[in-house]
Structure formats: C-alpha cells, structure tokens
Amino acid sequence: MTLQGREITKDNIELVQRLIEANPSQNRTWLSKELCLLWDWRAANGQIKDMACRTLLLKLEQRGYIILPSRRSPGRGSRKVSIPYVPHNTASIACALSDLEPVHIQLVEDTEPLRLFQCLLSAYHYLGFSSTVGENMKYMVFDREHNPLACLLFGSAAWKCAPRDDFIGWNAEIRKSNLKFLTNNMRFLILPWVRVPHLASHILGRVARRISSEWIEKYGHPLYLLETFVERQRFRGICYQAANWIYVGQTKGRSRNDRYATLKVPVKDIYLYPLTKRFREALSQQVGEQKGRQVEDDK
C-alpha cells in the first residue's frame, strides 16, 4: 500500500513491529524519528519527515497492522490546538486600496507573529486554525500603519483530485513523486472589519510571485502550481477569478486527503494557478528527473 506518498511493504510493517516490541519505554516521537533515519526518509532540505512518518504510523494502527505506544500527552487526533488571545486592532478599515499602500506581506516565522496569525485564524476564519503538518508557508498582511489585514496559509496539496490531475496530465506514479511541487491555499482570511475593494486579488497576485522562491529557501525545491478549494455554498471565488486562478471543476464531496471515499464534506470549486507556463512539463517529469534541473520560469 501507499501511505503519505511512501510505498509500505510487509517487511516495513514487520520492522515497525520489532521496533515497538524491542523498545517498550520509547514514545511515538522516538519511533517516528528512528524510522525516518532507518528509511532515510527526508525532505528536499535534508530534514527527516518526522510528522509525515507520525501520520503514517497512525494510519497503520487504524488499519490494525500495529499497536502504537500509549500517548504521554494530549494527542493530535484532530490537530486542533488551544490558541491564546493576542491583542489586535479591530477598528474598521474601509477605503481604497491605494489608501493602505504600501501593503506589507510578511512571511510568518518568528514566535510573536505566529501567535497573532494563529489567533486571527482561530477567531475569524470559519474553519479555525489547526496545527500544520508537513511543508507549509504562512503569510500575514499589514497596511502602512502595521494594522493586520489578512492571513494566508499554504500547505500540502490534495493527494488525489481528478479535475486537477486531468488538467496537469500526469499519471498516478508521477503524481506520487511530484506532488510536493504543488501547494494548497488552505486558508485565506480577509479580516471581517476590512472592506477594501480589490485587496484580496492584489494579495493573491503578490504572494504568487514570491512563494516559489521562498519555498526553495525553506524546503530546497520550487513550486510549479497552486491549488485551492472554495466551498461553493459559502463563497463564489471572485477574488481567485480576479487574480487569474483557473477554475477546473468541483470536488465530489470528499475530504482533500480522503483516499477511501469515506469522509463526506461540502462540494468545493477547484481553482489552480500555474507559477510557470511550463508547469505541465515540470510536473510530468519522471521520478528523479527533477534533481539538478529546475524548469525555467518563462512567464
């Protein structure tokens, strides 16, 4: 079977079972890190894929292949976290975009901006905030007075999405290898007291022009395509359309990571944004061809 993009064999499962039996005092964190080292399972920047391995182990347990050590602290079952309140200005901002400029888009990396980012998503986004697993990028947007305007979160792309996969033209094998060159705009929040025409599409356009280079710096590989899923009963996707994202179809009412057709969620419109004109060529290269050759951005 394939879990978290990795082929899992009977020998792999037996190895996990032996590690658990031989190390009864060790916890799940130790187990996932040890497996990453044994399998040499690493991201492009050389870091071990600890959280991906943790999720893989949970899936093996859910399917009855292993029994993991008991949790020593509250778990990440739903990955929801307790978010403390961070004071912030909620005064109404209703004006033209030019009145806010220069609009500053900040990559969220340090502790204090991260706390505000989490607080705002938790308080004002209808999906809230959940801790992120795997490669991700967080942005906050401020006006010239440093008042918060918006938050964006990019994370792992959906494992399988028929309209997107047809648009790209790749097969299942290549998708497993190259999915890391996509990212999903999981959250986009314009704060509820902000009423500025064209702000959302302006932000999307500016982020699209910088995210791949920042992804390379953080994770050691580029991005070639952005995706997002817009819940059609709530939103019309106007800002994505205005920012030239491409509508390619609808979901089938399944979770973005649901590979077994068991998780029912609202139907969503699918939008994609190529970061280079040659994105299909980049995403359709065979396994291993990406190393040492990055498709040139010819926009």
Image: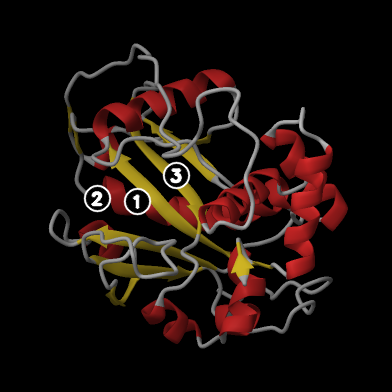
x 79%, y 74%: residue: 293
x 73%, y 70%: residue: 9
Could you tell me if the residues under marks 2 and 1 are in contact, i.e. CB atoms within 8 Å?
A: yes
Question: Depth check: 24 or 193 in front?
Answer: 24
Name the residue that disc number 3 marks. 153
Name the mark nearer the viewer: 1 or 3.
Answer: 3
Q: CA distance from mark 3 to mark 2?
A: 19 Å
Query: What kind of element bears circle 2?
Result: loop
Left or right for 119, reference 219: left
Name the residue that disc number 2 marks. 198
- Please state which amino acid type lies under the numbered disc 2: His
Left or right for 171, reference 254: right
Name the residue that disc number 1 marks. 202
Residue found at the far front of this picture: 21
| Residue 297 in view here | no
Q: CA distance from mark 1 to mark 3?
A: 16 Å
